[in-house]
Amino acid sequence: MQDLTTLTLTAAKAGLAAKDFTAVELTQAHLGAMARHRDLNAFVTETADKAMAMAQASDRRLAKGEGGLLEGLPIAIKDLFCTEGVLTTAGSHILDGFVPPYESTVSRKLWEAGAVCLGKTNLDEFAMGSSNMTSYHKGVRNPWTRKGENAALVPGGSSGGSAAAVAARLCLGATGTDTGGSIRQPAAFTGTVGIKPTYGRCSRLGIVAFASSLDQAGPMARTVEDCALMLEAMAGFDPLDATSADLPVPAWSKGLSGDVQGLRIGIPKEYRMEGMDGRIEALWQEGADWLRARGAETVEVSLPHTKYALPVYYIIAPAEASSNLARYDGMRFGLRVEGRNLRETYEKTRAAGFGDEVKRRILIGTYVLSAGYYDAYYLKAQKVRRLIKEDFDRAFGQVDAILAPATPTAAFRGGEKMDDPVAMYLNDVFTVPVNLAGLPALSVPAGLSGDGLPLGLQVIGKAWDEATVLNVGRAIENAAGFGLLPYGLGEAA
Amino acid sequence: MGYEIQGNTGVWEIVVGLEVHAQVTSNAKLFSGAATAYGAAPNAQVSPVDAGMPGQLPVLNGYCVEQAVRTGLGLKAEINRESVFERKNYFYPDLPAGYQISQYAHPIVGKGELTLDMPDGTTRGIGITRLHLEMDAGKSLHNQQDDATLIDLNRSGVALMEIVSEPDIRTPEEAVLYMRKLRSILRYLGTCDGNMEEGSLRCDANVSVRKKGDAGFGTRCEIKNVNSMRFVARAIEYEARRQVELIEGGGTVDQETRLFDAQKGETRSMRSKEEAHDYRYFPDPDLLPVVLDEAFIERIAAGLPELPDAKKARYMEAYGLGPYDAGVLVADRTTGDYFEAVAAGRDGKQAANWVINDLFGSLGKAGIALENSPVGPAALGQLLDLLNAQTINGRTAKDVFALMFETGRDPDRIVEERGLRQVTDAGAIEAEVDRVIAANPGQVETYKKNPKVIGWFTGQVMKATGGKANPGGVQQILKAKLPPVEG
């Protein structure tokens, strides 16, 4: 029998429908792969028993001809989503032993659609990072390595565990969250597809908050179609999230033709950066050529405030984070380090519970909100954020979607940027503006770097127009014919 | 009504502004569906949102918004079409999320005015600066266990309206009148039950002093925890005197937060301006700005009840009451309703006198609330009808009222059973008069020199008729039958 882990989500769905195999078999295959690839450290918690019970229930429903959109399909959940009765860590020491008595809306919708939970994937602590190196549970290894090398590379972050698990065929798909690129950058680093939908498309209820005005959940999978299918199950209005949009959820997976005939595609001139990997620039060109060859028109557009996006992001996101993370005080859940008095208990708990990157951002955020600095930093950043959004509004007056690189480089080694936070922050330069504007954007693998690592192209769309984003992504996917496996997995498969 | 503090260096006056926290009458909290009933077991009314659990999100309770708008309209205030919830950040165990959601730069209600009804019948306007919505924090229980502080989160997330006055108050009495009037309006509107013992209505006072005649303001202190009507005046008086003594002693008032100790009747420093928190307010990204449309505001305005000021004007106009009596009767809705039921179709002034003097006097003495009065408005009305039809006289009416209050029975039955009907049979009264005159020749002689003695004769006749005669009629007959007055 074929290795069921090599199937796409969509193919596995068809296989279950055709009774080629059972959900239990499909789940067992993935649990086996997880066990073989623990060296990747992709999972914080594996939920094998839960997975088997869910798979058996799915098989019963499938046998009766029932079942939801994702019935019997094993997936993984980023450990930022609260899961009822299952340890939820957010990659932090401070949430030690935290087992939520509630389920996040997104994961609940996935279970209601019949998906099977394999476990909780590793991530940068509180989703703060672009490498997965800030996780309290140690970094995730990218299943990809440079050609001829065996050195471990990062899978990107913060949804690095999800990206690695999808790339290494440990699950058919996984949830991610994207605050400044945390779905798209790891997708690009691991040769997988990830989409950050429009802000408000997926409920944030039950997702451990990093920066509330930027956080958005999305799917990560091996094809654009798989992402579309998964997003259908995840998205939708939630009256318990005031920022969730009361809009119908389109059947994105059904409308995926890859036909871009007559579409106008914007090429933002400000995304051509000094010091950008030449191969990435060439791939970007190639992407534009592919779309033109399929009948699209490419147009140069200007997003003049792009250069301010990174500084604006690193004011707004830490500001919100400094407040969102105040609740981790050792009083009600998670880690508590006793001091001689209340103040000392706070200090010791938070000193021991948070890692360096989280502390850095809490300090930055506290600073920019402080009396005397608020106007110069936070308020100014909010004004520039509006200008960035207006840049996109203007561009989308001319074009249907924007094509850009996903990242300025391919995956790097674990230690490479850890000593220089600013170099690390630069990784988000192409992804952050989209979060500030609240737009949908997708990263799709389009080629390899000079040393054989996957590179992604990013498609950015108008608010609520995930359909076009996915369709353009599908066109690039078809043209690129990526379909490559990480080195080392070929033999395993 | 001036209030002056005579210092060593001259005369001082006080400047007071009040910040009132009024708990919104609502079954659910401001940002969660948890219940708000008073007196539940600790932590029995806490949702994951109220406990600041990871990933939990606040969702605004629309009814609380409606209540805030209703209150704003009742205070004749501007309703802001757009308002913003912000986070006020500080660490404390009874604040689980590490921030309180409040309104800061953009409150839901702007400037308004509250009218004080002064004891001399005049009125005085006190400016309202703003009203904003915010969530309450939980409660720290320090005395339940020796080695620990316990936290009760039942109050965490309960909706409060913070109502801030302009520094227009000039006497401790005005501060009390302000609190009473505000509570009266809130109760009329049904937006806060005004129960200070249960903490539904709490008051902080900003107090400063200045030399009489000065236009500028002195440095103010914020007095926290002024949580009964009695303490409002006491705390202000104490604090003002403290400030005057401090300044006259060569010191300066530090801007600080002080706590009122009700037992000692004094204020003491909680934290100085330097120790004040930097709350790092910023708009809460979990909540959208509150945008109100005209139809929403108009619908609430259309449903407002008649408020005390309008009712007072109507009582003065329709019943001919003076401002003081009218003010007393409108102070709360049940009093006004009671009065109007008694006054319907009767003499309003007479009804007001009976309600204010006889009924309130008896209720006050017995410590009974109007809602539980043994004498209902219908029965009191019947009593007035008996009086006005001269079925009973004024004195009998007072006695009947006392019996009604004691037994809760109808005046008709009391009058019938006890045979208290006024004696209107002129022949019977004349016979009694003749008998009294005949029996008291000495008093008749005295009367000739001192006509005031007619009062004594009247008393004798009344006594003989068991108080049922009409005293005016008795006097007329006496005058006719007694010999003429000499000189």
Image (tube, rainbow, N blue to C red):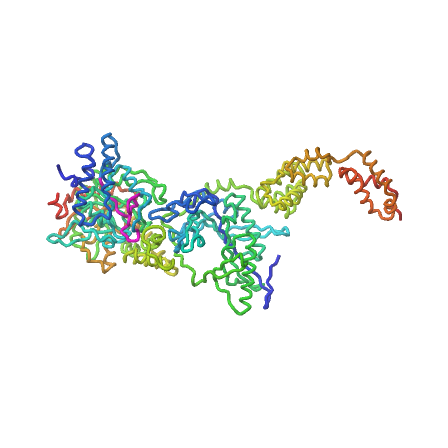
User: Which quadrant is the C terminus of chain A positioned in?
Assistant: top left
Q: Is residue B317 visible?
A: yes
What stretch of residues is rendered in magenta? A74-95
Q: Give the left or right position of residue B356, taking residue B231 as reference.
A: right
Question: In the displayed structure, would residue A77 be above or below residue B226?
Answer: above
Residue A207 in picture, x, y percent from top left: 31, 46
Q: x%, y% of residue B4?
A: 60, 61
Residue B51's x, y, as percent? 38, 48
Q: Main secondary structure of the magenta part?
A: loop
Q: Can residue A401 be seen at all in this image of the molecule?
A: no
Q: Locate residue A483 relative to residue A212 in the image: left or right.
A: left
Would you say B451 lies left or right of A454 here? Answer: right
Residue nearer the viewer, B442 or A261: B442
Q: Quadrant of the N terminus of chain A?
A: top left
Q: In the rendered picture of this protein, how many numbered marks are placed on residues?
A: 0
Q: Seen from this angle, which residue lies furthest bottom? A: B250
The image shows residue B292, relative to residue B141, as above or below, that is above
- Which residue is farthest top? A64
Does the segment drawn in magenta span residue A92?
yes
Q: Does B424 lie within the magenta span?
A: no
Using the image as rendered, state which of residue B406 and residue A323 is in the foreground.
Answer: B406
Between B16 and A164, the residue placed more toward the observer is A164
Residue at the spot 51% in from the left edge and 40% down from the top edge: B303
Q: Is residue A419 above or below residue A46?
A: below
The image position of residue A218, as x and y in percent, is 26, 44
Residue farthest toward the right in the current orientation of the protein: B487
